[in-house]
């Protein structure tokens, strides 16, 4: 039976207790305050639920990750990076990126990025922990992604494209900036063919948790208003200079 989490204190069960079916479902309840979210990410856990559900917390096994140096840029994408006419920024339009990610998608009746989720990640953005990468053409936002940066790890949450390959352009720029800035890993959460085509791969959850403990330290306990669990060096600048990128590299 899944544990129901009280509002406080912030406490998660061990990830090894997550269900196999559905893969990774760990617990129900808690809330979306910074203390809960940061405690979750430090432990390899993330929220994912619909408007008609309570908060559901997940830690799937295996875990899909992208090591920045393994980003795969095929010839067609390389050409688009060189000649696509895109401008790439970071944290220039966080609200618009998450709102667009939450918008309707072809073949999807709803969204898991609820209003409460948007407000929660806006709070993390105000703390300097949640970040976005934007792709522009002629002043119009055509693609992007957002997630949470802790130390050398970027926990990706969602991405979107209004033009072909625009989200791929955002991910390539993030991966390259992480290579430049000693970033180690992009968490992609669950397997998708789209991410696999870009070089992401599945690793065992235990291996993933091992990376987090190695690079972020073992997650401490957290209180209701505690944001001190942000590890040293969490700032987005550590991941590289995406915010200063204005043209693509071939």
Image (cartoon, grey):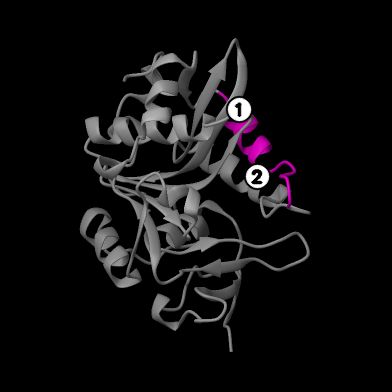
Q: In this view, does 167 lie to the left or right of 99?
A: left
* Number of residue marks: 2
**201 or 29, nearer to the observer:** 201
Q: Write down the residue under mark 2.
A: 118
Q: How crowded is mark 2: few (under 14 residues within 10 Å), some or many (20 or more)?
A: some
Secondary structure beneath dot 1 equals loop
Where residue 113 appears, as percent x and y from the top left, is: 66, 50
Secondary structure beneath dot 2 equals helix
**125 or 144, nearer to the observer:** 144
Q: Which residue lies furthest to the bottom in this view?
A: 1
Name the residue rendered at 67%, 55% in the picture: 112
Q: Quadrant for the C terminus, please.
A: top left
Task: Using the image, determine if residue 45 lies above or below residue 78.
Answer: below
Q: In this view, does 182 lie to the left or right of 11?
A: left
Which numbered disc, 2 or 1, marks the residue that appears first in the sequence?
A: 2
Bounds of the magenta segment:
93-107
How far apart are labels 2 and 1 at the CA level? 23 Å
Q: Is residue 99 left or right of residue 245?
A: right
Q: Is residue 101 magenta?
A: yes
Which dot marks residue 163? 1
Task: Using the image, determine if residue 215 lies above or below residue 24.
Answer: above
Name the residue rendered at 38%, 33% in the picture: 172
Q: Quadrant for the N terminus, please.
A: bottom right
Where residue 170 appears, as percent x and y from the top left, is: 46, 31
Q: Is residue 133 magenta?
A: no
Residue 205 is drawn in which quadrant?
bottom left
């Amino acid at each position: 039976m899944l544990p129901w989490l009280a509002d406080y204190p912030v406490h998660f069960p061990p990830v090894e207790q997550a269900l196999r079916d559905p893969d990774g479902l760990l617990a129900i309840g808690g809330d979306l305050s910074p203390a809960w979210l940061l405690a979750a990410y430090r432990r390899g856990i993330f929220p994912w639920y619909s408007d008609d559900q309570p908060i559901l917390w997940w830690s799937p096994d295996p875990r899909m990750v992208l090591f920045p140096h393994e980003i795969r840029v095929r010839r067609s994408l390389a050409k688009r990076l060189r000649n696509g006419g895109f401008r790439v920024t970071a944290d220039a339009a966080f609200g618009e990126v998450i709102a667009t990610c939450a918008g309707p998608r072809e073949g999807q009746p709803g969204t898991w990025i609820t209003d409460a989720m948007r407000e929660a990640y806006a709070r993390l953005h105000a703390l300097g922990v949640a970040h976005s990468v934007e792709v522009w053409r002629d002043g119009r936002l055509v693609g992007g992604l957002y997630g949470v940066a802790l130390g050398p790890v970027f926990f990706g949450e969602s991405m979107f494209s209004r033009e072909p390959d625009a989200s791929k352009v955002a991910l390539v720029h993030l991966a390259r900036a992480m290579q430049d800035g000693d970033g180690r890993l992009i968490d992609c959460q669950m397997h998708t063919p789209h991410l696999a085509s870009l070089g992401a791969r599945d690793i065992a959850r235990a291996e993933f948790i091992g990376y987090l403990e190695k690079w972020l330290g073992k997650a401490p306990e957290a209180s209701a208003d505690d944001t001190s669990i942000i590890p040293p060096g969490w700032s987005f600048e550590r991941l590289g200079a995406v915010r200063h990128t204005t043209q693509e590299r071939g």
